[in-house]
Amino acid sequence: MTLLGVRNLRVHFPTEEGLVKAVNTVDLEMKGREKLGLIGETGCGKTVLGMCIMRLLQPNTEVAGEIWYKGRDLLRLSEGEMRKVRGREIAMILQNPATSLNPVLRVGEQIAEAIRLHQGLDKRTAWARAVEELEAVKIASAEERAKEYPHQFSGGMQERAMIAMGLACDPALIIADEPTKGLDVKIKMQVVRLLKEVVREKAMLFITHDLGAAAEICDRIAVMYAGEIVECAETSEIFRNPLHPYTQGFLNSLPNRGLKPIPGVSPSLIDIPSGCRFHQRCDCATEICEEEHSEMVEVKEGHFVRCFLFGEKDA
Amino acid sequence: MADFVSQFRENRTALVGAAVILLLVLVAIFAPQLAPHNPIKASLGDRLSAPSEKYPLGTDHLGRCVLSRLLYGARISLAVGVVVVGVAAAVGVALGIISGFYGGVLDEIIMRLVDAMLAFPSIFLALAIAGTLGPGLGNVMIAIIVVEWTRYARVMRGSILSVKENYYVEAARALGASDFYVVTQHILPNAIAPIIVVATLGMAPVILAATSLSFLGLGVQPPTPEWGMMLNDGRLFMRRAPHLTTFPGVAIMITILAFNLLGDGLRDALDPRARTEKELR
Amino acid sequence: MLNYILKRIILLAPILLLVSLITFSILYIIPGDPAETILTGPGGAADPKAVEEFRVKMGLDRPLHIQYLKWLNNVLHGNFGYSYMTEQPVLDPILPAFRATLKLAVASMILSLLISIPVGIISAIKQYSLIDNLSMTGALLGVSMPNFWQGLLLILLFAVYLGWFPVAGYGENGDFEHLVLPAITLGTSSAAITTRLMRSSMLETIRQDYIQAARAKGLSERVVIGKHALKNALIPVVTVAGLNFGYLLDGSVVVETIFAWPGIGKLMVGSIYMRDYPMIQGCILFVALVYVAVNLVVDILYTFLDPRIRYETKAKAK
């Protein structure tokens, strides 16, 4: 059963340099308890997509399309209804815990306030629940730690606190934005393992550029490039049989696969190349790639790719 | 630098400030040509008259033309501003250079002195000094210089400390350049922009302090026209001649406003991020 | 905490010493001989014998450093000197005058915060809106308007024309109706500065990630701004509270003079007219000590407000 369905989503926002076309006709499906990895380089629009689902973008952002969650289009909810979704139904773990935790509020309070709000608990009970949440993310002596301020936490602990904050009201869907960014390898593994454990009963949209972490956690992986999804398949399939040249390049840039970077730089979201967005950096590009924009093609069951190399095969 | 100029050009309010200041300077220079009357000539028959064709802004308690006095008053306020800021900046820059460049005991002494000066509310200290020295424009200027130099010393010291880290200063020293050479050729050119901003922003408080002290009777002595003193004179005739409490105040406010606009614009053009910190300084 | 406060006080010692030196030297910038200057009345030159007597009585005949040490010793024992006019201890009039100033300053500060915090917040969250433009224009005019002129305009409008408030004075004991106009004069000009600060601080704060994080929890905008943003945005405002108090003290000089408010500013101006140098000295020293103390308190308060400030690093930065 579909939990989250993103249909034809387009997100553009004006900046001084020009209109940023951050998300362009994105479609995504997520079932209950499914873990979907959203992979892409920095600046490909994946964070904007996450923020758009939460409806936390600037008011001047132009959003078109539909975001269906449990039978309701989130884009059509009033702000008041949306507030009841945030934190309670869908929780987002923002990137950069060091800046996403409020420096002047105690960590426990930052978890407890959401509990008080959504579950109507009194101060004391909510605080006790917040301490439990901190214990659940394996923070030692949680009772004392809850009374501390974010700057007293290490980077890994801050990330755990962010996770605890996200889990506090038992949401059905978690959007985790780069939760492993900036952590050293050992801490990163701990966070990945923790995340895998705590979201077992939930769905999660795992936004990352870390393929290794995504492989560890996710059932399916969607690869994003220049504001659109270029390939989507089950995790094992993506690793075994990557089809889109960008996905292949991305995989080949991994340390254990030769560390070969993709030539060129990812395009600016203001001047998106015509045709296939990847054609300038693609070894297999042909004339058609420069001019026309490929549709998403289901190459085999559950494996979608947006590339003429495969579209033609079917046609 | 080109970036700085274009940043500044975009700031319209700052341009307005600059234009008003230019206008004030012209008024000050051409006061004799512009003034319809002799600013110090009493004409007791026309005492406290309201604005009229003959006296566009009315007359004061001695029948002197308020407009003429305001025009001449611009000379005093601007001159006080320029001289005080100039001397205070020169003293502050010199002490800031000594402090930042040589460090050590000299730095310690100068910075503690700055701290001690800042331990006094500035108008109180200026008032005490001007009051003790006795009435007179020169004494008022000395008093304000004494409290104003600290801001330049701090800024100068700060920029020297950051410039000093730069390799070319080290390189120049390694080549055996004299201290004087290093300071004038390498350090000053790099540290001068913030000083200009601080000096522009420093004009408003200086003019304000000078008019305040004149208002209290410590600045220029009659019959020289000065805005603060004119306001003080007008106080006694508030009911009969409200124009005497209005126009000099407008003149002061326009001047202060123009310098604030220009200073804010310069600062933003130079360092758009430094907004919060300075707001009270 | 106690350690931190002690450390701050110890660091203040050299500054206080310099403050006392500066204050002491004010007496020695009098043009000519103080005794002669003081005793020279409108009737002409003073009687040399009287000058000599005065000098001995006031201790002006001793070497400078002895005079300083004696003066410092007296100050440390709570004796700020004797007025040349009344020959009474200068602290006798200073203390009640300061009470009046404090009353005015506190009223102005409260008014200033009541205006600047809400206006600054609204301006920031509705950046570039009509209300923001209006309040920023108002703040700019307020910053540029000299206190003494604003005071005169208020008197003209509310006392002379409308007659709602007395023109000037203190009433029995700084009565409310006497307090209103001077407090508005001082409070609004301080509010002009604080509003700009509050706005820029709030603008900075609402761009932070933790504000988005707070929204992501489903908190209402009221809680996001009123709790998460405000607590952070107030920190710079508290940081400059000491400076702000100094600004109010400075303003009290002209405002008290205009409104005949018997505070320390008016006392100081009065003693300048009377050439009562010990009184000038006493006033300036007292004001400096209060100002230093207020700044110390603000610093301590600040550490309570911002948990990130480690006491050690703060002490080092000073």
Image (cartoon, rainbow, N blue to C red):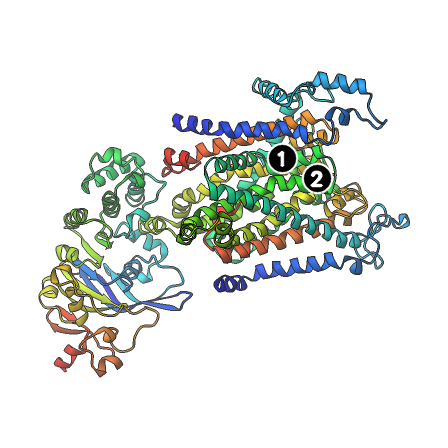
- Asked if residue C24 lies left or right of residue B272, the reply is right
Determine which residue is flagged by label 2: B139
Horizontally, is C81 left or right of A27 in the view?
Answer: right
Compared with C53, C189 (above or below) is below
User: In this view of the protein, which residue sits in the foreground, A141 or B104?
Assistant: B104
Near mark 2 (Cα within 10 A), the count class, few <14, some 14-19 or many ≥20, is many
Viewer-proximal residue, B189 or A150?
Answer: B189
Q: Above or below — where is A23 with respect to B232?
A: below
Q: As shown in the figure, which amino acid type bears the numbered disc 2? A: Asn
Q: Earlier along the polypeptide chain: callout 1 or callout 2?
A: 1
Q: Quadrant of residue A274?
A: bottom left
Dividing the picture into quadrants, the one containing residue A227 is bottom left
Q: Give the farthest residue toward the front.
A: B176
Which marked residue is nearer to the observer: mark 1 or mark 2? 2
> What residue sits 53% from the left and 44% below the top?
C194
Question: Which chain is home to disc 2?
Answer: B
Counting from the top left corner in percent of width and height, residue A73 is at: 28, 62
Q: Amino acid at mark 1?
A: Leu
Q: Which mark is residue A43?
A: none
Picture quarter with the C terminus of chain A: bottom left
Q: Residue at x 59, y 28 (%)?
A: C21
Few, some or many C-alpha atoms within 10 Å of disc 1 (few <14, some 14-19, many ≥20)? many
Q: Nearer the viewer, residue A246 or A263?
A: A263
Residue C214, x across and y down, in percent: 34, 48
Q: Secondary structure at mark 1?
A: helix
Which quarter shows the N terminus of chain A?
bottom left
Task: Determine the image quadrant of residue B124.
Answer: top right
Label 1 marks a residue whose chain is B
The image shows residue C118 at horizontal and vertical percentages of 50, 46
Q: Which of the numbered marks, if any, corresponds to residue B125?
A: 1
